Image: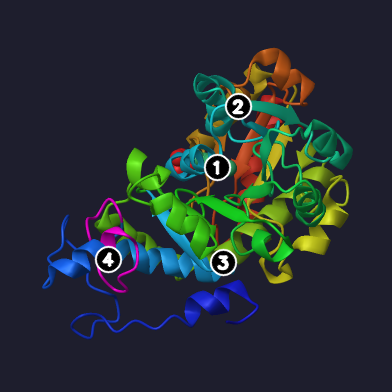
Amino acid sequence: MSHKPANNIQDLQYFGEFGGVNPSISDSATYTFLHAKTMLDTFEGHAEGCYLYSRHTSPSNLYLSEALAAMEFTETANVAASGMGAITSVFMQVCGAGDHIVSSRTIYGGSYAFLKNFAPKFNISTSFVDITSLEAVENAITSETKMIYCEAISNPLLEIANIAELSKIAKKHNVLLVVDNTFSPLIISPQKLGADVTIHSLTKFINGTNDTVGGVVCASQEFIDSLRNVNDGAAMLLGPVMDSFRAASILKNLRTLHIRMKKHSENALFLAENFEADGLKIVYPGLKSHPGNELFKTMYNKEYGFGGILTLDVGNLDKANELMELMQHENLGYLAVSLGFYKTLFSAPGTSTSSEIPEDEQLKMGLSDGIIRFSIGLDNDIERTYRAMRMCMKKVGVL
Ligand SMILES: *Cc1c(COP(=O)(O)O)cnc(C)c1O
């Protein structure tokens, strides 16, 4: 295995069933066995190369899983029907009644809602902490804690988690470090920095075409086997399974991820630097003004830059809405949630993707309602985009 994530994806060689350079799509829910004994072995998880039933696993899903494991330097991986399908399976696998999670307070709204509102039904409790304070993280750990949970670059505030130091704390207290790396595929390799489990929503940069949702858990063989266990595996029993056709299409898109990530980052850095110089309130990990900028540089795979997401604070929601509507009208992108698309997407997180977080808590974590989150697209002429965005900002009076 190369120590560079994109090489690992590039180096995978496929000889399809009929010699195809793309593996054939497995269009079966169930699989035959020539010998009854092999079926039993497959049930128990030790029949190499045999398939049982597509909720367990399928050839197409395994192809995609192995490519994502190669990217994340983990032994193996398991794809899921959505990012939330991957995330919630991990929570439910690791934690039982009475257990406790220490989570970053700035996480994806769905993950936050699950931990805050749903997990308590199973008597699983969560302490939400400022993940940039290692002291706060360690102080929150109790004898019941099973997991530290965070996002490498947090949504939507773009705080940077110090994965290496969090991993030391996790090891010291014998808990798992689980990192959602959705904002930074190829850019950050959490497993290399000491994370135990790396999760992605494939819906975003990895698939990159906004035609499907998808998710993945990348981890050790032992952990993935436990997730898929027919008797007590969360992925197997909750059933958030990806369809084979989707797995095949996401695999094809994965092959150009390295080119896309470089362009997203290059464009985002250009806009962030110029808008900051114009006097706007920009948050972007690639700016010296970002409190996590130095830390980021100790963690990243430099050639992929600082990622495609930046935020702009225009002061209040009305201005944010006015600006977003105008930018969409001027064809600079779409007023839409999600990220990683070829066109720029923008939304106001306070009223959309983070609306699950109560208003007073949003304020506490610094999430003002004038914040616009941008997922910067693959624009070939970013200077043209900059000039046009600047015009919009002048028109609505933010500049
Ligand atoms: C979108 C997203 C998720 C959820 O993924 P889905 O594919 O929508 O289920 C989780 N974490 C982060 C950081 C996300 O951006």
Q: Which mark is residue 41?
A: 4
x then y, percent, for residue 240: 35, 43
Judge depth for marks 2 and 3 and give the one in front.
Answer: 2
Q: According to the image, label 1 marks what residue? A: 94
- Image height check: is 78 above or below 349? below
Q: Secondary structure at mark 3?
A: loop
In the image, residue 88 lies in the stretch drawn in magenta: no
State which tag comes first along the sequence, 1 or 3.
3
Q: According to the image, label 2 marks what residue? A: 98
Q: Quadrant of residue 47?
A: bottom left
Judge depth for marks 1 and 4 and give the one in front.
Answer: 4
Q: Main secondary structure of the magenta part?
A: loop
Residue in view at x 55 percent, y 21 percent = 120
Using the numbered discs, state the Cα–Cα distance from disc 2 to disc 4 in whole angstroms: 34 Å
State which tag comes first along the sequence, 2 or 4.
4
Magenta highlight range: 42-56
Q: Which mark is residue 74?
A: 3
Judge depth for marks 4 and 3 and give the one in front.
Answer: 4
Residue in view at x 42 percent, y 63 percent = 65
Q: Quadrant of the N terminus?
A: bottom right
Q: Alpha-carbon neighbours of circle 4 within 10 Å: few (<14), some, or many (≥20)?
A: few
x then y, percent, for residue 129: 76, 31
